[in-house]
Amino acid sequence: MSETHFGFQKVDETQKASRVRGVFDSVASKYDVMNDLMSMGLHRAWKAYTVAVANVREGDRVLDIAGGTGDLARAFAKRAGPRGTVVHTDINESMLRQGRDRLLDDGLVLPTAICDAETLPFPGDSFDLVSVAFGLRNMTHKERALAEMNRVLRPGGRLLVLEFSKIAQPLEKAYDWYSFKVLPRIGKLVAGDADSYRYLAESIRMHPGQAELKAMMKTAGFGHVDVHNLSAGMVALHVGIKC
Ligand SMILES: C[S@@+](CC[C@H](N)C(=O)[O-])C[C@H]1O[C@@H](n2cnc3c(N)ncnc32)[C@H](O)[C@@H]1O
């Protein structure tokens, strides 16, 4: 049996996906309001930057992995237009349902699939762009998921990974205080769930930093990887090209 991390806890790797599912089942209905509160709206700027870098064009085929409540899928669908395809996916049905309802409210009906990023149900070379925002750190076998993302991209296609990363050293103490003292309290007050937000802070600390993730993407088959630090490295956008 192999072990992996669930936040700071060591768990058998067969248990991680169900523990992660528990977190997102618990937070799904409050996910959007909590995102705005916890990041003080910053997640909107990080996603807007990602959408600008993605530069989706009319007719593009896009796969949004761990798409949750659909922020990126919505923005991509508006750009890909009726000739394009944006597939909205997540492993968690509760999150996907929240996203599907929000997309429908915006008049968007997208192909939607419950799927695990580690075993994507799509043929190779199917997409021009694959995105995963704040999802990779929750996956049990990140290398396997990155290799799958590479497989489904066409040669020359790009993977965009938006994820929490390693913040600049002078800000570390303040960030730790906010993450471990403030975040779980907001989680308890607003979502009635301190533990899930404690997991959020811990999973961010356990996630590979900028250089390590770049190396993992290269190993997964991305010939060129650019790293864009956002908000002093609190978040990073990694852009990998399949070549
Ligand atoms: C923090 S949410 C991000 C949602 C959305 N992308 C956003 O940026 O708002 C993380 C998402 O990752 C999903 N997830 C976790 N493990 C996954 C896996 N192995 N495959 C696909 N999605 C996964 C969760 O269900 C959850 O919806």
Image (tube, rainbow, N blue to C red):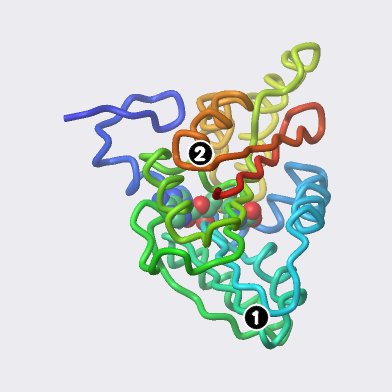
Compared across the picture, whether 52 is left or right of 105 comes to right
45 in relation to 28, above or below: above
Mark 2 neighbour density, 10 Å: few (under 14) some (14–19) many (20 or more): many
Between 26 and 143, the one nearer to me in the picture: 143
**Percent position of residue 59, x then y:** 68, 79
Label 2 vs 1, first from the N-terminus? 1
Residue drawn at x 57%, y 63% as measured from the top left: 64
| On screen, residue 216 above or below 14 | above
Is residue 21 visible in the rendered structure shown here? Answer: no
Location of residue 212 by image quarter: top right
Residue ID for mark 1 = 84
Residue 224 is left or right of residue 233, and the answer is left
Pick the residue in front: 187 or 62.
Answer: 62
Depth check, front residue: 75 or 203: 75
> How many numbered tags mark residues here?
2
Q: Is residue 67 left or right of residue 174?
A: left
Disc 1 is placed on an element classified as loop
Q: With respect to residue 131, does 144 lie above or below? A: above
Q: Find out if the beta carbon at label 2 lies less than 8 Å from the nearest ligand 1 atom.
A: no
Asked if residue 181 is positioned above or below residue 129 in the image, the reply reads above
Q: Write down the residue under mark 2.
A: 137
**Coordinates of residue 13 in the picture (x, y in percent):** 27, 36
Q: In this image, 44 relative to 199: left or right?
A: right
Give whichever of 95, 184 is nearer the camera: 95
Which residue is pictured at 40% across the width and 33% down the height? 6
Q: Position of residue 213 (x, y in %)?
A: 55, 31
Name the residue: 66% across, 28% down. 179
**Mark 1 surroundings within 10 Å by alpha-carbon count, few (fewer than 14), some (14 through 19), many (20 or more):** some
Residue kind at label 2, given as amino acid type: Arg
